[in-house]
Amino acid sequence: MSEHTTKAEVGTRVTHRRYVPYSHAHYAGNLVDGAYSLAAFGDVATEMCILTDGDEGLFASYSDVQFKAPVRAGDVIEISAEIVRVGRRSREMAFEVRVVGRGNPARGESAADLLEPALVATTARGVVVVP
């Protein structure tokens, strides 16, 4: 892409899903640290930059990071990024981690349930820059 060509538009969205492995649990109750969500935001932001600008981009800042509910090992999470502002080289995104599945040991060692509705665990705003 030339340096001024972009497909970035407000409302463009990227979503990933992943299983949270037990090797990432850091605290009692199999809690995962907040940095896990921030790393996941980096992954969806990278895909967004590739999709819209043909470049991985660089994260410039996070703002308004909120940890609203726990993420636990064994969860299935959905991570999304949505462009909310497009500058010449900057892209502001709204991020969200939702827990869409969670283990249910009361039903059995490997039992799990889909959560309806999904549980919003982490939200943030972030700015990336592209060349």
Image (tube, grey):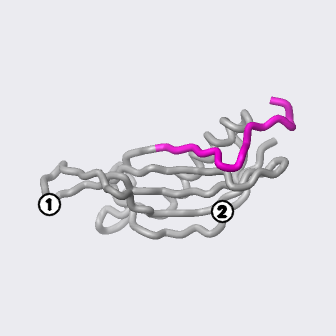
At 57% from the left and 56% from the top, the residue drawn is 95
Residue corresponding to mark 1: 106
On the image, the x and y values in percent for residue 110 come to 18, 48
Q: Is residue 123 above or below residue 11?
A: below
| Residue 10: % across, % down | 70, 49
Q: Dot 2: what SS?
A: strand
Give the extent of the magenta segment. Answer: 1-16
- The N terminus - image quarter: top right
Alpha carbons under labels 2 and 1: distance apart: 38 Å
Q: Is residue 61 rendered to the left or right of residue 119?
A: right
Towards the viewer: 26 or 99: 99
Q: Is residue 96 left or right of residue 28?
A: right
Asked whether 69 falls inside the magenta stretch, the response is no
Question: Which residue is pictured at 72% across the width and 45% down the height?
Answer: 9
Which x, y percent locates residue 58?
72, 48
Dot 1: what SS?
Answer: loop
Residue 70 picture quarter: bottom left
Q: Please tell me which residue is depicted at 29% across the width and 55% down the height of the picture.
A: 102
Q: Which of the labelled discs sits on residue 64, or is there none? A: none
Q: Which residue is mark 2?
A: 62
**Residue 63 point in image, percent of width and height:** 66, 66
The quadrant of the image that shows the C terminus is top right
Q: Overall secondary structure of the magenta stretch?
A: loop
